[in-house]
Every structure is written in C-alpha cells, then in structure tokens.
Image (cartoon, rainbow, N blue to C red):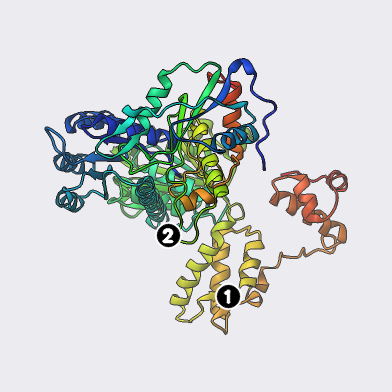
C-alpha cells in the first residue's frame, strides 16, 4: 500500500533538499527526490552539489564521521529547505559502530546517506545498479523518517523497521505501517507537536 | 524492539555517549548517560535502570568496579560491557561477575540490536516466570480451593489482603460454592492460624441449643446442665469462629452476639461472671441479608458489625473456566479414595459438564464425579456416566405441560444470560420480539 497523505506540504513550509556531496554523480539524488515525492508526498528537489567536508574525515578510522557531517551541514543556511538529505559515496560511521548506511538525529534537520557499502555483493548475488539505487532510496526515506521524529518500528513490513545489513535492507518495504504513517502525518501537519 | 526500556550509558568519551543516545532515541528507549562510575551510581540511586552499557576503561571507578557495585546494590539491572580491542580479559572477568554480554568497540549496528533483543527476551522470560510463579502460588496456596478463573483470582487476592486484619468478614454465595473453604483459607493465612478454627452451621442447630453451644453454660443452669461447659466463643480462644448460615439465627441471638463482638466479653448461661473472649468472626450466608433487614427479620446493627468486609464467591456457572481444573482435581481425589483407576474423562463428557448449569455448584460437581467414579466400569468417564445430570423433570401433571416446560426453559436461559434478551433469543433460536412477548406472557423475570 502506498502512503497517501492528503496533499503536498504547503510550499511556504519549505522543501526537502537532496544534496549530492563530493563525487556523487549519476541518478542517485534524483531517484531519492523522486521517492520522497512519491512515498512521502513532499516536494523534494535536488540541490547543487557540494564538496565533501575534509574535516569530517577521521584520520584513525579513515572513514567520515556521520555526526560531524550532520553538524557541518546543519550549520549551513539552506534556503527553502525544510529538511536536507545529503548523499555521499564515502564510508561513514558513528563512533560506536563500524559503519552506517545512513544517519539522522530524531527531529533533526539533516540526514546523511552513503552509497559506499550499498554496492557490496551478497553471498548469493552481485547487486545490479537498479538494486543499489533502490537501497539508497530506502535508506534516505528511512533517515528522513527519523528527521520527522519517526522511531524504529517493530513491524518488519514497515520502512522504519531497522535493517542491520544489506539482506535486511533488501527485504525492507518502501511503505510505512499505518502507525508510522499516522505519526508522519502528525509531524507534517503539526510540526511543533501541538496536538492532533 | 517489543518493549521500551530504561537504559544508562556509562562512558568517559562524549562521542560514544552521544552515539548511544542518538541510537536509542531512534528506538524510543528512555536513555541517560553518565561520564563516570560515580555519576552512574548517583543516577541509579535516583531512578531504576533496566540496562546499563558500561565502558571498562574509565578514569576513577573503572567498569569492573562499577559492575561489582551495581550487581550488589541493584541486581535487577542488566549490565553490558563495552570495551576496546585489548581488554578482552577484563571482559571475560566482567562476564563472570554477572555482565550479560560485551561489545567490542566499534561494533556493527545489528550486533547491538542482537544484544538488545537478547536482553528483552531475558526480561520477558523473567516477567513471565514471575507472573506464572505468582499465579501458581495463588492456585496452590489455597490447596482446597480450586480455581484459576479471574473471578476466583479476585477471591484469592481478597483472602490474602484481609487475612492479616482482624475485621469481621461476611462470605456470600450460593450453596456449594465453598464458603467454608474460603473461611478456612482466611484463617490459615491469618496470624490466628495456630489457634482453633471452629465452624458452626447456625441453620442446623435449634436456637436454644445454639445459645448453649456458643456461650456455654454453668452447671445447673438448666435441667440437663450436669456440669459447667465452655461455649465455642470461649473455646475458640485466639482463633477464628465461622458461623455458617448466619441469616438463620434469631433476633435474640443476634443481639447477644452483637454484644460479644462489641465488648469482647460474654457471660455463660446461668452465670453472672463476665469472661473475656478473643476470636475473629467470619460469617456466611446464601440469603440476601439486606432483604431480611427490610423484612425485619435481621438486625441492621448486627449486619453492619458482621459485614465489615464482604466476599462474594461466584457460582460455578459464572466461572465455568474452572470446571476442567475441578474435574481433574476430583478425578484424582476419588480415583485414589476408591482405589479405582478412573482418571480420565472423555471430551464429550467434559463438554457436557461444561454445559450443565450446576445449581449445587462445586459440591454438586464433586458429588457427580464421585458417583461417576464409583459406578464407572472403565478408566475414562463418558457421557453415559453423567446421564443422571439431566435437569429434573417436574412431577405434577400441570408442571409437565408444554407451556410450563417452555416457561421454565426460557427462565433458565434468561438466568444463564443474566437477562440479556438478545443473547437469550440467540440461544433459544427465536427473535427478540418473540422472546419479549413470551417474557410478558409468562410474566418472567429478566434476571
């Protein structure tokens, strides 16, 4: 079942900006924007690409710190954008984890998602370009959900269900369960959480 | 994650604490962080935490010392050790000291998820164990009262709650529901348990004799009083007096008992000497005492004195879920007593017993099982062994008319459905309008 919200977010509330970072080229940002528009019914636009912030690099781990990246992008003034999904092709991490596919803070403004590990082959098959794009779109929608305060969901059929690996990610649905759908609707139309 | 938990992160590295905080916020757990062992103990002293993630290497109190403290002061808190490469030995030590798991930093996100699932499962098992243990205790601790229905669980709870007090208890319920067993259970759980429990059926003893039985008499006080005798109110000394069928006693006896209850003193028949008494009164009745008060046959002041706490024991038809348990109990009891290996019941027979209305309640069920066991020729009781449970047919010709049978049947179904016309009509296979007409025509009561 496809998420049906009554209407697009009013434009005065801003848009979802999809921001290609560094060497990210190709269809990934457009695919992400299209999925945000298609599944969350929000205005999403691909913004002009930005350089990869070198200071987010962790010299010991040789990976990019997702937290630092979020802090850097959040400090920037992004005209019009309500929320931002930054798309990278470098390996990103949070200090306790070896890596993450994406990262966002609950109710935050910026999510980061990375293509770096999404092309990894599973024991059974090498992923096609289409399945890599499907994976990045799922990660982006999932992290965007966190920006709208959605939490991890127990329902394995829900987009907000946590997927620890690529196999889980491939099984993940693009759709929200009815509870998460309701929470998202509340977050969109009552952004300060006043009441429903 | 099935249950939201309260979690504390203890790590001297801010980035680690923040990573955990952000992660657990996404799941919806209540999460707090402490930068040191002492801060963690301060937080634990203020609020309980179900799970703690503790770094081994911290300045001041290290993770092992903190674990030792937590396990001794807050044993219900689950501890997971987080460690960097090179401190595996400490991790093993921590596991031996009671940590449930350890995570080697940095770890994969799904490793943390697995640890949390394992903890949640353990918590669930502990909760289930505690619940079942409590329920089992409730079922077994009143070994003569069988029941696991919600209605009986409420009775068991009340027994436990009131056993420790000294207040008078009134047990109400139909005949055969086990009022005396409940009285015995209250006594057994009370501080008076090591003193006598004396049960008297007031309805079975003539009033004049009851007075002598309760109050005792002085030698020569009446023709057959050949020697002085203590009454049960004295003999019970320190124990519990159970007066069954309290609704049957005379007004004079009510006044006498009321005085004893208020003054804790009595005078034996034929004596002027006051004697101190010490007992707890539990009364029981199958009558509606309030109706008797309205009719003027029961004293209101005495009623209030004996009815401080009331326990209504539900009839068996209102707790049919207990019937299989009772069948099992009585089968075991009578197959042992009769030395016959009749220890099973067929599904059909059990279904028949479940359907039956049991006007005589548990006592009738017990008698039915005893009779069936005694007469059975096979190991398994079948429906034929309970043929005698057919509803008794009316004896007079008038009462055996079709109209009388219809009236009686509709009344029975209405009683079973607590007067719910829709439900009763569905059982009877007629529509509600027809049932209403019949209720009016036969002048039936809805309840």
Q: What crowding class fits label 1: few (fewer than 14 Cα within 10 Å), some (14-19), or many (20 or more)? A: many
- Residue B144 is tagged as 2
Q: Residue at x 49, y 27 (%)?
A: A49
The quadrant in which the N terminus of chain B is found is: top left
Residue sitting at x 48%, y 53%? A167
Q: Which x, y percent locates residue A61? A: 27, 40
Which residue is identified by label 1? B372
Q: Is residue B299 visible?
A: yes
Q: Is residue B222 visible?
A: no
Q: Which mark is residue B2?
A: none
Tell me the element at label 2.
loop
Query: Is the C terminus of chain B in the top left, top right, bottom left or bottom right quadrant?
Result: top right
Seen at 62% across and 34% down, the residue is A34
Q: Earlier in the sequence, mark 2 or mark 1?
A: 2
For the residue pair B186 and A85, the one nearer the viewer reads as A85
Residue B342 in the image: x percent, y percent? 51, 79
Query: Secondary structure beneath disc 1?
Result: helix
What is the chain identity of the residue bearing mark 2?
B
Q: Around disc 2, counting alpha carbons within 10 Å, would you say few (fewer than 14), some (14 to 19), or many (20 or more)?
A: some
Indicate left or right for B309 with B398 as reference: left
Query: Would you place residue B263 above or below residue B360 in this image?
Result: above
Between A175 and A37, the one lying in front of the other is A37
Q: Residue at x 55, y 40 (%)?
A: A137
């Amino acid at each position: 079942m496809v998420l049906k919200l009554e209407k697009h977010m009013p434009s005065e509330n801003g848009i979802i900006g999809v921001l290609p970072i560094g060497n990210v080229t190709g269809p990934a940002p457009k695919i992400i924007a299209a999925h945000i528009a298609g599944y969350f019914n929000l205005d999403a636009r691909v913004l002009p690409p930005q350089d990869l912030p070198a200071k987010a690099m962790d010299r010991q781990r040789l990976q990019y710190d997702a937290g630092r990246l979020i802090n850097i992008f959040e400090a920037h003034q992004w005209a019009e954008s309500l929320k931002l999904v930054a798309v990278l092709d470098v390996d990103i991490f949070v200090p306790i984890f070896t890596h993450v596919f994406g990262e966002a803070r609950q109710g935050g403004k910026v999510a980061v998602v990375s293509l770096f590990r999404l092309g990894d082959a599973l024991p059974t098959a090498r992923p096609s370009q289409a399945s890599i794009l499907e994976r990045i779109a799922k990660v982006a929608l999932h992290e965007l959900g966190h920006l709208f305060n959605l939490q991890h969901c127990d329902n394995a059929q829900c987009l907000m269900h946590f997927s620890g690996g690529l196999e889980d990610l491939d099984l993940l649905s693009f759709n929200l369960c009815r509870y998460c759908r309701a929470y998202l609707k509340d977050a969109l139309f009552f952004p300060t959480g006043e009441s429903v | 994650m099935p249950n939201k938990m309260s979690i504390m992160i203890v790590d001297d590295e801010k980035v680690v604490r923040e990573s955990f905080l952000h992660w657990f916020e996404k799941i919806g757990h209540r999460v707090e962080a402490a930068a040191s062992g002492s801060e963690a103990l301060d937080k634990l002293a203020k609020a309980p935490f179900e799970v703690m993630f503790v770094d081994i290497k911290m300045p001041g109190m290290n993770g092992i010392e903190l674990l030792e403290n937590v396990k001794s002061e807050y044993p219900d808190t689950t501890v997971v050790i987080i460690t960097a490469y090179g401190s595996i030995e400490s991790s093993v030590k921590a596991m031996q000291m009671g940590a449930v798991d350890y995570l080697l930093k940095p770890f994969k996100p799904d490793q943390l998820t697995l640890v949390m699932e394992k903890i949640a499962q353990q918590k669930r098992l502990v909760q289930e164990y505690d619940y079942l243990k409590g329920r089992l205790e409730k079922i077994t601790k009143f070994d003569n009262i069988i029941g696991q229905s919600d209605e009986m669980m409420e009775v068991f709870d009340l027994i436990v709650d009131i056993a420790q007090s000294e207040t008078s208890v009134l047990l109400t319920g139909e005949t055969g529901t086990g009022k005396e067993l409940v009285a015995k259970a209250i006594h057994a759980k009370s501080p008076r348990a090591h003193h006598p429990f004396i049960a008297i059926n007031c309805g079975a003893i003539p009033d004049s004799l009851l007075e002598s039985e309760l109050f005792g008499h002085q030698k020569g006080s009446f023709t057959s009083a050949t020697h002085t005798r203590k009454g049960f109110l004295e003999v019970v000394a320190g124990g519990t007096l159970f007066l069954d069928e309290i609704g049957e006693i005379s007004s004079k006896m009510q006044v006498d008992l009321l005085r004893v209850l208020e003054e804790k003193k009595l005078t034996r028949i034929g004596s002027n000497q006051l004697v101190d008494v010490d007992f707890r009164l539990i009364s029981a009745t199958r009558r509606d005492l309030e109706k008797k008060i309205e009719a003027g046959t029961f004293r209101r002041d005495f009623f209030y004195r004996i009815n401080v706490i009331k326990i209504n024991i539900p009839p068996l038809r209102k707790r049919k879920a207990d019937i299989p348990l009772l069948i099992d109990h009585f089968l075991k009891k009578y197959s042992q007593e009769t030395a016959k290996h009749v220890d099973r019941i067929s599904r059909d027979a059990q279904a028949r017993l479940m359907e039956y209305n049991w006007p005589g309640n548990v006592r009738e069920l017990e008698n039915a099982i005893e009779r069936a066991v005694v007469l059975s020729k096979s190991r398994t009781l079948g429906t034929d062994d309970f043929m005698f449970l057919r509803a008794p047919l009316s004896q007079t010709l008038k009462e055996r008319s079709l109209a009388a049978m219809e009236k009686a049947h509709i009344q029975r179904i209405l009683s079973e459905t607590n007067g719910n016309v829709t439900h009763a009509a569905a059982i009877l296979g007629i529509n509600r309008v027809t049932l209403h007409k019949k209720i009016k025509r036969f002048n039936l009561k809805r309840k």
